[in-house]
Image (cartoon, rainbow, N blue to C red):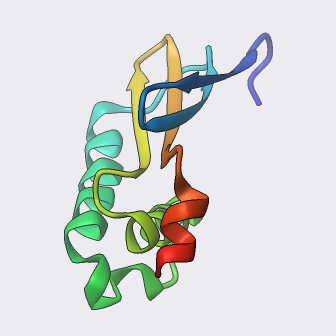
Amino acid sequence: MYPGCRMMESLKKGRTDLVIEVADNGPGIRPDRLAEINSMLTLLSENAQLGYGRQQSLGIANVHARIVLQYGSQYGVRKDSFESRGTVVSIRLPLNMLQIHSDK
């Protein structure tokens, strides 16, 4: 954690989704590195059924792969960052996840 850096958490409930956000006001992530991370998350979303989430990698990638496998590619982890302003990590889950889980 950087000196003076603060973390903020929020929950947003939509009609069908729940979004959990964790944000900070730190230095942010370099645009090239953020693009790499988001590219990896997109690849995992598109290929979750092929086992791409099983490799040893970022914890975020493993969490994202498990969510996508369980609930579909419209759900999962997303990262946004603004250089010199901070980073936001969002986790999108279906509100009716207990019902979806019991239907499988």
Residue 14 in percent (x, y) is at 45, 25
Q: Quadrant of residue 59?
A: bottom right
Which is nearer the eye, 86 or 18?
18
Residue 9 in percent (x, y) is at 70, 23
Task: State how many labels appear.
Answer: 0
Residue 13 in the figure: left or right of residue 47: right
The residue at 48%/13% (across/down) is: 84
Residue 19 in percent (x, y) is at 52, 34
The residue at 54%/57% (across/down) is: 97
Q: Quadrant of residue 17?
A: top left
Which is nearer the eye, 35 or 44?
44
The residue at 22%/77% (across/down) is: 47
The residue at 51%/27% (across/down) is: 88
Q: Quadrant of residue 27?
A: top right
Is the residue 5 above or below the residue 94 in the image?
above
Quarter of the image with the N terminus in it = top right
Residue 22 in percent (x, y) is at 63, 29
Residue 66 in the figure: left or right of residue 25: left
Is the residue 20 above or below the residue 39 in the image?
above
Residue 11 in the figure: left or right of residue 50: right
